[in-house]
Amino acid sequence: MAAAAFTDPQEAEQAFYDAFRRADLDAMMAVWAQDEEVFCVHPGGSRLSSLEAIRESFSQIFAAGPTMRFDIRAAQTLRGGLIAVHSVYEYISILGEGRPPTAVVATNVYANVGGGWRMVAHHGSLAGEQEAPVQAQPVPPPGLLH
């Protein structure tokens, strides 16, 4: 599989959620850094600490085909040097189920590896009853006073 060359963390994040929506395992794994130090925690699950374990988990999630719809809200980002951290609210609907979306708070970590941005960590937790804020405030650059 050819390595994806994402020019910024936002492009890598878009590819992550696009792969999820399409249930495309190859596209999903192209987002991840080719490093055994990566990890993933699905809501309610344990930590998966290798590419093989992450691949297997997404293979199981995608087995039924493209059944998930994501509404991503309230993105908050931190970026410094070669690392970017994104915190988002994922509202996940299962197609054909008619239940309200499940709210998940996700943290996605990207690193600039080999000239492009790739995912190195994903952690999703159920958000509970609290609604996501309408819009997160942008984080000011280091050294900026207000």
Image (tube, grey):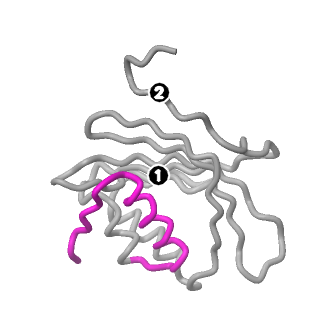
Q: Is residue 131 above or below residue 64?
A: above
Left/right placement of residue 129 relative to residue 91 reads right
* Sequence-earlier tag: 1 or 2: 1
Rate crowding at label 2 as few (under 14), some (14 to 19) or many (20 or more) other CA atoms within 10 Å.
few
Question: Of helix, strand and loop, which one carries label 2?
Answer: loop
Residue 31 image-quadrant placement: bottom left
Prevailing secondary structure of the magenta residues: helix
Residue labelled with disc 2: 140
Q: Position of residue 111 (x, y in %)?
A: 30, 46
Identity of the residue drawn at 32% across and 53% down: 8
Q: Position of residue 143 (x, y in %)?
A: 38, 17
Q: Position of residue 20 (x, y in %)?
A: 51, 71
Identity of the residue drawn at 50% across and 66% down: 17
* Quadrant position of the N terminus in the picture: bottom left
Q: Is residue 54 above or below residue 82?
A: below
Asked if marks 1 and 2 touch (Cβ < 8 Å), the reply is: no
Q: Position of residue 99 (x, y in %)?
A: 83, 70
Q: Which residues are magenta?
A: 1-25
Q: Is residue 146 above or below residue 66?
A: above
Return the mark for residue 37.
Answer: none
For the residue pair 34 and 15, the one nearer the viewer reads as 15
Nearest-to-viewer mark from 1 and 2: 2
The amino acid beneath tag 2 is Pro
Left/right placement of residue 136 relative to residue 37 reads right
Residue 144 image-quadrant placement: top left
Identity of the residue drawn at 35% across and 69% down: 29
Residue labelled with disc 1: 122
Q: Residue furthest left?
A: 114
- Magenta span has 132? no
Residue 117 image-quadrant placement: bottom left
- Magenta span has 23? yes
